[in-house]
């Protein structure tokens, strides 16, 4: 077989995915932007392409980065690049968008009522949400309780993020544009609530480039200074907090880089520049993200709805004075709080404006991980859970927990959407494709869900099961992509079902800003088999 493959014209054909991925590492590629790698047969033909009439289960959770690729595979009117008519039996683990024509295995429960945006609007406030495009989905969809609806009171200002492959080259991102939009919003008359997000620390913190990370922290601090000055000038009440931690624990104890999120709390600072006469305010010293929305409502003297079970962080002994009519909630995305200086990029970078605010204003720390944000105990936070809880004012059980419980109690394996997809593949002699993130723990999914689907496919008697793996080192050890793909292949061998046929960095497959050139590259690998080649070998066709 090797001799036949080596006679094929073109670049080297690798013996395994692990070999191909590690060769890519040596050439300077990282997991996040790994160029697609595909499996081929003895004649060099791609194996496991997504084809007409096949079944496909996209097992990612969270959802906002999964919409574009799903559209390219399912929308008959898709026009961003040439696609084939596939007529797939397509299932998503959770609902990514109501507009998608797919089956949803775990549909959303009842819509969250009385989130912060809705309550403020009902009280006559104009709500202005300002972010870079990188975080627009978070201040909109997630902050509104995972709702695609835009309230009548709501205005969204999206500053385009730089169009680059590597944000390390532009660690300032578009923070200056966010600050300008905040200044303009604060200058308005009337009752106004402004939600703003500075994305730099979270986005750049996922890149293994210390210089860029420090520059991102400094950029946020400079921008914070502009926003503080504007809030003081416009007599606004300013709250500064974060959605989760990242770069305050950027190194593991052994000194290797941790590009993921953390289990540290986040700061909460109340800088009230309203000028309203009041007694000195003191805050409850520790809380959680769900406490922020009730605190905002307390500042505006708006009754907290019964659905919000969070606490007002302003201690009852404080006199709130007259209602504030300008309130600004500023989210320093990824800015955790940790005293230990080892590997702490926030301590290492100069942050004079944040330090001054922390020293001079009432402050607290908030849990932003684990059960406090609806996730399993001891797990790291993320932007989805963080923004969801900041806006909801209550703990919300996340999809991951519900799905894990379904696996534990066996209902996962009786899920109608999964069984229908498997049955369609079995009875029509078609393939079942399992597609998604390959990671022990990612906000977008886990290999535990993939392994459960492989067991389901085996029990359903599906013969052709193909795995398409998306990798990206966030909070993982070096070479984690190769390690995870090897783990998936090992599990396929143990279960005697399935084979990995495509591997690529999540940069290509999980876009959310209409970078259709990225999605097309992912599509070409999945549907056409375009990419670096790995030879098919071994029992049951697995390398």
Image (spheres, helix red, strand yellow):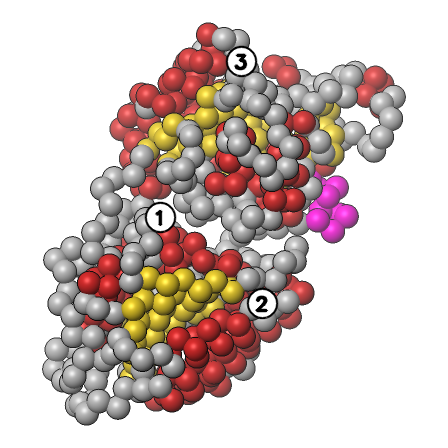
Residue sitting at x 25%, y 39%: 109
Q: Which residue is mark 2?
A: 173
> Does residue 297 appear in the picture of this structure?
yes
Q: Is residue 104 left or right of residue 260?
A: left
Image quadrant where residue 228 sits:
bottom left
Q: Which residues are magenta?
A: 21-29
Q: Quadrant of residue 296?
A: bottom left
Identify the residue at horizontal 32%, vertical 50% (top origin).
149
Question: Going 15% across and 85% down the picture, which residue do you hit?
Answer: 321
**Residue 63 drawn at (x, y percent):** 43, 43
- Nearest the viewer among 315 and 232 is 232
- Residue at 34%, 75% (x, y): give it: 328
Residue under circle 3? Answer: 430
Is residue 320 shown left or right of residue 195?
Answer: left
Q: Which mark is residue 148?
A: 1
Q: Give the alpha-carbon distance from disc 3 to disc 2, as whole Å.
A: 45 Å
Tag 1 and tag 2, C-beta contact below 8 Å: no
User: Label 2's element?
Assistant: loop
**In the image, 32: left or right of 534?**
left
Q: Which mark is residue 436?
A: none
Q: CA distance from mark 1 to mark 2?
A: 26 Å
Secondary structure of the residue carrying numbered label 3? loop
Q: Is residue 464 or residue 254 the one in the foreground?
A: 464
In which quadrant will I find the C terminus? top right
Residue 27 within the magenta-colored segment of the rendering: yes
Q: Position of residue 213 (x, y in %)?
A: 58, 68
Ranked by sequence position, the earlier of labels 1 and 3 is 1
Q: Give the x, y percent position of residue 450.
A: 46, 31
**Image height of 62 relative to 155, above or below:** above
The N terminus appears in which quarter of the rendering? top right
């Amino acid at each position: 077989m090797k001799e036949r493959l080596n006679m094929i014209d073109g670049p080297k054909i690798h013996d395994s995915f692990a070999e191909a991925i590690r060769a890519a590492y040596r050439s300077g590629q990282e997991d996040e932007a790994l160029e697609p790698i595909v499996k081929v047969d003895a004649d060099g033909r791609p194996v496991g392409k997504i084809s007409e009439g096949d079944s496909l289960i996209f097992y990612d959770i969270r959802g906002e980065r999964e919409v574009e690729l799903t559209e390219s595979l399912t929308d008959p009117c898709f026009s961003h690049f040439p696609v084939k008519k596939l007529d797939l039996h397509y299932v998503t683990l959770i609902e990514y968008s109501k507009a998608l024509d797919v089956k949803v295995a775990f549909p959303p429960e009842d819509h969250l009522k009385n989130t912060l945006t809705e309550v403020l609007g009902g009280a006559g406030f104009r709500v202005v949400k300002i972010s870079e495009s990188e975080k627009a989905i978070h201040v909109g969809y997630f902050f509104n309780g995972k709702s695609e609806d835009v309230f009548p009171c709501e205005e969204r200002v999206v500053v385009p993020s730089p169009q680059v492959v590597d944000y390390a080259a532009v660690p300032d991102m578009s923070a200056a544009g966010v600050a300008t939009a905040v200044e303009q919003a604060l200058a308005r008359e009337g009752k106004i609530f402004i939600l703003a997000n500075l994305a730099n620390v979270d986005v750049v913190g996922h890149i293994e480039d210390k210089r860029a990370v420090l520059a991102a922290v400094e950029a946020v601090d400079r921008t914070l200074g502009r926003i503080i000055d504007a809030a003081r000038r416009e007599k606004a009440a300013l709250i500064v907090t974060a959605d989760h931690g990242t770069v305050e624990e950027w190194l593991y104890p052994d000194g290797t880089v941790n590009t993921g999120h953390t289990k540290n709390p986040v700061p909460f600072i109340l800088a009230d520049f309203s000028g309203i006469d009041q007694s000195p305010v003191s805050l409850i010293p520790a809380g959680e993200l769900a406490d922020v929305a009730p605190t905002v409502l307390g500042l505006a003297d708006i009754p907290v709805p019964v659905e919000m079970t969070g606490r007002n962080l302003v201690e009852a002994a404080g006199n709130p004075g007259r209602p504030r009519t300008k309130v600004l909630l500023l989210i320093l995305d990824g800015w955790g709080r940790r005293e230990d200086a080892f590997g702490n990029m926030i301590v290492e970078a100069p942050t004079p404006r944040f330090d001054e605010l922390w020293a001079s204003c009432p402050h607290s720390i908030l849990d932003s991980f684990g059960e406090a944000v609806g996730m399993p105990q001891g797990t790291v936070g993320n932007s989805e859970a963080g923004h969801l809880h900041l806006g909801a004012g209550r703990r919300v059980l996340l999809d991951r927990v519900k799905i894990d419980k379904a696996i534990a109690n066996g209902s996962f394996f009786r899920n109608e959407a999964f069984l229908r997809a498997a049955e369609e593949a079995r009875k029509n002699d078609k393939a079942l494709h399992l597609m998604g993130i390959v990671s022990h723990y990612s906000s977008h999914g886990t290999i535990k869900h993939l392994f459960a689907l492989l067991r389901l496919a085996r029990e359903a008697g599906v013969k052709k099961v193909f795995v398409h793996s998306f990798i990206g080192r966030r909070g993982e050890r070096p070479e984690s992509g190769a390690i995870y793909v090897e783990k998936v292949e090992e599990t396929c061998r143990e279960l005697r079902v399935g084979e990995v046929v495509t591997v690529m960095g999540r940069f290509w497959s999980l876009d959310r800003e209409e970078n259709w050139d990225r999605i097309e590259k992912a599509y070409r690998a999945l549907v056409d088999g375009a990419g670096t080649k790995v030879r098919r070998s071994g029992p049951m066709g697995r390398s």
